[in-house]
Amino acid sequence: MMTSFTRIVVVLSFLRQSLGTQQMPPNQLIVGLSLFLTFFVMAPTWNRINEDAVNPYLAEQITQKVAFERAEAPIREFMFSQTREKDLELFLSLGKLNKPQNRTEVPTYVLIPAFVVSELKTAFQIGFMLYLPFLVLDMVVASVLMAMGMMMLPPMMISLPFKILLFVLVDGWDLIVGGLVKSFS
């Protein structure tokens, strides 16, 4: 929940729905790709945690408490970079907390749900943008079929191959994965 996984898995699920394929790609593939993209996006943060907290703790150079504090800092930094101010304010007000003077005063238990809500909002915005071209294609196919008097033929049967062709021709996987990874920069 404190990584890029939420946004990635929701966007890939939206992609499958917008294409109109019920089980392609399968859930296991969507979750697997989401996990590996999460590892890719989170690698710099996890490397910092490893260097600043885990290795010194394992070498018995710092205490467990200090290791936890050092590990928490990069995660909080990542979450702050992806959290909307409005979502943070919402959870501060729900927790009946005063507005903090700086980021260090924001409790982690407030930051985490604000981050998750921000990730969901971003994922839904990206999902909406994914739906638009495929919706237009569905509408065009349905209109053409209606104009031809073929009302009994399901438009999805005709539009699905065109949607897959469009996705392949524009190199959809490259665009989606590239856009998702860049959205965390």
Image (cartoon, helix red, strand yellow):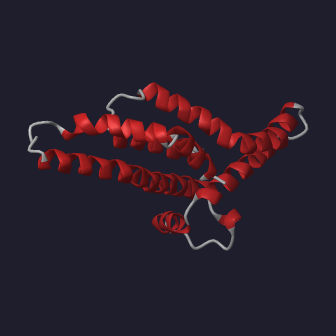
Residue 92 in sight from this viewpoint: yes
* Number of dots carrying numbers: 0
Q: Nearer the viewer, residue 11 or 133?
A: 133
Q: Nearer the viewer, residue 132 or 67?
A: 132
In the image, residue 37 lies at what x, y percent? 60, 37
Q: Quick one: quadrant of the C terminus?
A: bottom right
In the image, residue 130 lies at what x, y percent? 42, 50
Q: Quick one: quadrant of the N terminus?
A: top right
Q: What's the residue at 51%, 68% (across, down)?
A: 86
Q: Is residue 158 left or right of residue 85?
A: left
Q: Is residue 98 left or right of residue 159?
A: right
Residue 64 in sight from this viewpoint: no
Q: Is residue 11 left or right of residue 23?
A: right
Q: Nearer the viewer, residue 30 or 139?
A: 139
- Relative vertical location of residue 119 with respect to residue 38 in this rendering, above or below: below
Q: What's the residue at 42%, 29% (across, down)?
A: 25
Return the residue found at the far front.
Answer: 148
Q: Is residue 180 left or right of residue 68?
A: left
In the image, residue 40 lies at what x, y percent? 67, 38
- Relative vertical location of residue 95 with respect to residue 136 in this rendering, above or below: below
In the image, residue 12 lies at what x, y percent? 46, 40
**Residue 101, picture quadrant:** bottom right
Q: What's the residue at 25%, 36% (across, down)?
A: 158
